[in-house]
Image: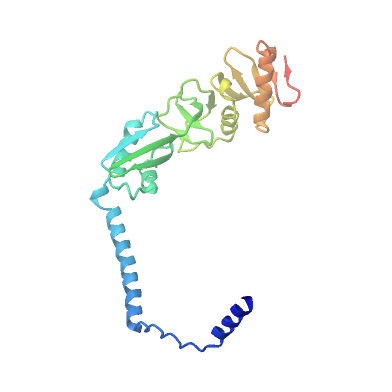
Amino acid sequence: MRAAATATLRTLASVRWPALPRPPAAPAHLGRWLIGLAAASVLAIGAYWFWFRDSSLVQVDTVTVEGLTTKDAPRVRKALVDAARDMTTLHVRPDELARAVSAFPAVRSVGASADFPHALHLTVREQRPAALLESRGGEKVAVASDGTVLEGVEGGRLPRVSLDAPVAGPRLRDPDATRYVAVAAAAPAPLAGEIAAVRERSGGDIVARLRGGPKLVFGDTSRLEAKWSAAVAALAGGSAAADYLDVRLPERPAAG
């Protein structure tokens, strides 16, 4: 049986079968026409998309703004709403939003979230005040940790930093005051609201005075995180009644 099957296969293999006819080749102009059609379709879709994303069909008409606490909140909100209503939910322009609030130093950034087809939600991130600058003329203005002067921001229970002259310009330029602000800005949350003032004592060391607590001697602005950690640990360990707490060497804080 196996020998018969093998012989049959050999016979079939030796037969010269007639070649099957090839399918007719597509005309060359048909291929070019299909390529052109595909390219035209892509261009048409792209043109429609660019038209549609900026059309009135998706125009922003409802704008919500959150995150504002500055005194200038009404003006900031209006500037953002006016800018947003020139946009669509398919074409939000963050650079235009940033430009709209560039005159307000209290605004650090603006985030946008579109709700198709007509709503835009804006989240304002504000600069957080680190200290309150007080000039000899009585002027008071909040300042952020990076030295940005925050006009219109409430001072609250911020640490006081004294200046010889009023603040001029959008940023703090006084080198000594900049160091004091850096000390205040590095304070951990539990103590940030308890700092009455930051200044330099006669020996040249930076001192932060706590409300109802000791003076914290920092020396310079190096290793501020470690120095504040040492101060927190010492205060929690029973040094809150001391007159001063020296954390210039955070590994060996000294109370007196």
Relative image position of residue 6 (x, y in whole percent): 61, 79
In the image, is 123 to the left or to the right of 133?
left
Q: In the drawing, does residue 191 fall left or right of residue 243?
A: left
Q: Which residue lies furthest to the front in this view?
A: 1
Residue 79: x %, y % from top left: 32, 39
Q: Which of 24 and 206 is in front in this view?
A: 24
Q: In which quarter of the image is the C terminus?
A: top right
- Position of 211 relative to 35 (above/below): above
Residue 177 can be seen, yes or no: yes
Task: Determine the residue positioned at 61% across, 13% down.
Answer: 213
Residue at 51 percent of width and 89 percent of height: 16
Which residue is farthest top?
241
Q: How is the image coloured?
A: rainbow
Asked whether, in this view, residue 39 is left or right of residue 182, the answer is: left
Farthest residue toward the right? 252
Where the N terminus falls, by quadrant? bottom right
- Numbered circles on residues, count: 0
* Quadrant position of residue 228: top right
Q: Where is residue 115 in the image (x, y as percent from the top left)?
A: 33, 41
Q: Residue reaching furthest left?
A: 56
Q: Is residue 69 left or right of residue 37?
A: right
Residue 74, how many percent across, how many down? 32, 31
- Residue nearest the viewer, comparing 165 with 222: 222
Question: Is residue 205 in sight in this rendering?
Answer: no
Q: Quadrant of residue 236?
A: top right
In the image, residue 163 sits, relative to residue 40, either above or below, namely above
Residue at image location 69% in from the left, 18% down from the top: 234
Q: In this view, does 156 lie above or below 59?
A: above
